[in-house]
Amino acid sequence: MICKEHSSITRIRIYLLVISLGLFAFTDSEFFRRNFDFQRLLYQYETLGPSNSYQNKLGIEIEGYYTEKGATDGNFSLTPYRDLIDLSRTSLGTNGFKTLRIEDLTKTELKSGAVGLFYKSVADPDSTEKRLLFISDISIYHPNGTKPVEVVSPILETKNDVDAFFSVLNAATNERGFSPEPLNSGTHIHFDFNRPQREEILILTIVIEKLLPEIKAAFSVQDSRSNEFAAAYTATDFESLAAFTKSVFPLSRTSLLNVQRHRATNWHSLEKHGTFEFRLFNSTTDTKLLTIQADLIGKIVRAVRLRDPKLLNLLKSENLSALTLDSVTRALDCLYKDPRVRTYAHAVSERDVQRSKQIEHKLRPQETFLQLRNLSFNGFINSTLNQEIVRQYSTPYPTINYSLDLPTLHGNRCVDFYK
């Protein structure tokens, strides 16, 4: 049994090595090697010292589809996301949260067809209000008779927050068939990046993009999606980023950055949300896989912002040769360093892809954004609360300050963390 496991791990490592050698990253480009003074950047980055504004906080967006009770493709507007909202309220209640209100967020800075569920801890009335979002997204492919939706987590600040959000995902998956579509849709993870320094933006981009080919292979990310919605940085992209960070514009004004948003490394979210967004991962509803992914990128972000000496040593290697997925995950003590976790992550990712390929001929995009006509959620919330159930949302989308209290592995298997 042990020999069989080691053989499997060896095959995965060889596969990742071949992939990483075969794919091109901008860190191998002529511009980066000859025209960009990386050693000077590294010196400035190291001497600045750790960021005082770092917070271990994050948020997750998952694109997928599900089946609404009694709904057909032409009848969605009659009961927009009713099943998901009802399930979410039940799941949140089980985890000690009380639903405060449900709001139509249409005609805001969010996409058309957005509904927000606002809730708060029952045990701590003074706790921060949380918001769970269900958003219509025309980029999500789905089978006929199902309903595409992007589920956006609230600000995740504690393990209780994470457990509550994962319980919503599990309920939607088990009871309403909420499914990922990894050929065209993704999981986007935002990490707090308030008050960044120029050097941090460039160093994080270099680290992520150097590891991108290996991450792509490790999590079975398909070219059909990544090339369109989560592409790698080109040398031109990085040159534009470097120029932007030296410009007179504030670093937070990333809408002026001449790089498309649809990159695996997305800095446009810095202006809107105060975050760094990683867009490469396939959409998934597997909570263990989400934990592994959030832990991997989150610890890289943390190491960059806090000037982790172990990461600095890897960055000082000749031509970044020591900066590999294996070395980074071991140095930063990521869950992914465990061979069992690697096997699990690749197996689940590949399973989702193959399942989607079997129904690929049935998938189609949503033609228009979901219109929430005659929206009424009366009956979802106890009327004795004497609240306005549906009102227009006018407050700006809050600066995202996310956190994740991650579990650890125990014994000789991947523990089912969130039962």
Image (tube, rainbow, N blue to C red):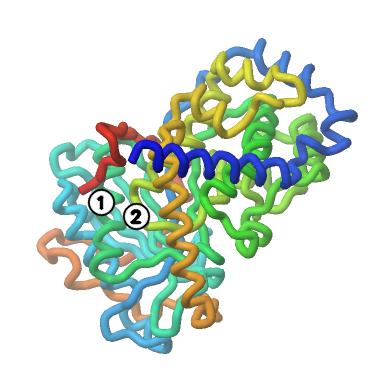
How dense is the environment of label 2, judged by Cα within 10 Å: few (below 14), some, or many (20 and up)? some
Q: Which residue is mark 1?
A: 119
Q: Amino acid at mark 1?
A: Tyr
How dense is the environment of label 1, judged by Cα within 10 Å: few (below 14), some, or many (20 and up)? many
Query: Where in the figure is residue 319, as x and y percent of width and height?
Result: 76, 25
Asked whether residue 366 is in view, the answer is no
Query: Where in the figure is residue 277, as x and y percent of width and height?
Result: 55, 44
User: Is residue 11 found left or right of 119 in the rendered image?
Assistant: right
Q: Residue shown at 47%/75% (left/top)?
A: 358
Q: Residue shown at 82%/44% (left/top)?
A: 236
Of labels 1 and 2, earlier in sequence is 1
Identify the mark at residue 225; answer none if there is no mark.
Answer: none
Q: Residue furthest top?
A: 47
Asked whether residue 65 is in view, the answer is yes
- Along the line of sight, the residue nearer the viewer: 135 or 252: 135
> Which image quadrant for residue 65?
bottom left
Query: Where in the figure is residue 307, as x and y percent of width and height?
Result: 57, 18
Q: Amino acid at mark 2?
A: Leu
Q: Which residue is mark 2?
A: 132
Mark 2 element type = strand
Query: Disc 1, disc 2: CB below 8 Å?
Result: yes
Q: Residue shown at 63%/40% (left/top)?
A: 17
Image position of 76 with respect to 315: above or below: below
| Picture quarter with the N terminus | top left
Q: Residue furthest left?
A: 384
Marks 1, 2: nearer the viewer:
2
- Along the line of sight, the residue nearer the viewer: 379 or 257: 257
